[in-house]
Image: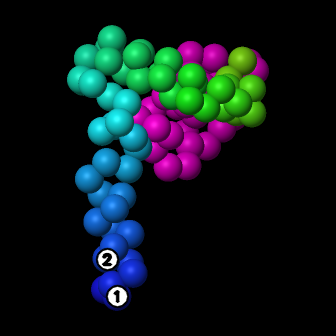
Amino acid sequence: MNQAKEDVRHFWDPASCGEELYLAGENREAYQAQTVTRYTVEPYVPEFAGFYCLAVRTGALGCSQCGACHSNLADSKSTTR
């Protein structure tokens, strides 16, 4: 593997979703707090992502900041895959 790819891998592999910055534990409360923090830092995401639409089919790309977006889509009754 060339050095640039190796550098990218070393950057993203340990914590690619912001969990070191925003996730204080692995229980429900920690994930809920992480979601609040994410949408405080990035308040445009819910409207852009359309979490409040019902019955839409979506595909998840990437890890979506520890699952914050994916869990919002699931809560909205969207079909995620």
Q: Which residue is label 2 attached to?
A: 6
Residue appearing at x 26%, y 17% in the figure? 27
Query: Is residue 22 shown above or below 30?
Result: below
CA neighbours of label 2 inside 10 A, class few (<14), some (14 to 19), many (20+): few
The one of 69 and 58 positioned closer to us in this rendering? 69
For residue 28, which quarter of the picture? top left
Q: Are marks 1 and 2 in contact (CB under 8 Å)?
A: yes
* Residue 10 located within the stretch drawn in magenta: no
- Image quarter of the N terminus: bottom left
Residue 53: x and y in percent read: 75, 21
* Residue 65 located within the stretch drawn in magenta: yes
Residue 15: x and y in percent read: 31, 48
Left or right: 63 in relation to 45 = left
**CA distance for labels 1 and 2:** 6 Å
Name which residue type carries label 1: Asn
Name which residue type carries label 2: Glu
Q: Which residues fall within the magenta stretch?
A: 53-81
For residue 46, which quarter of the picture? top right
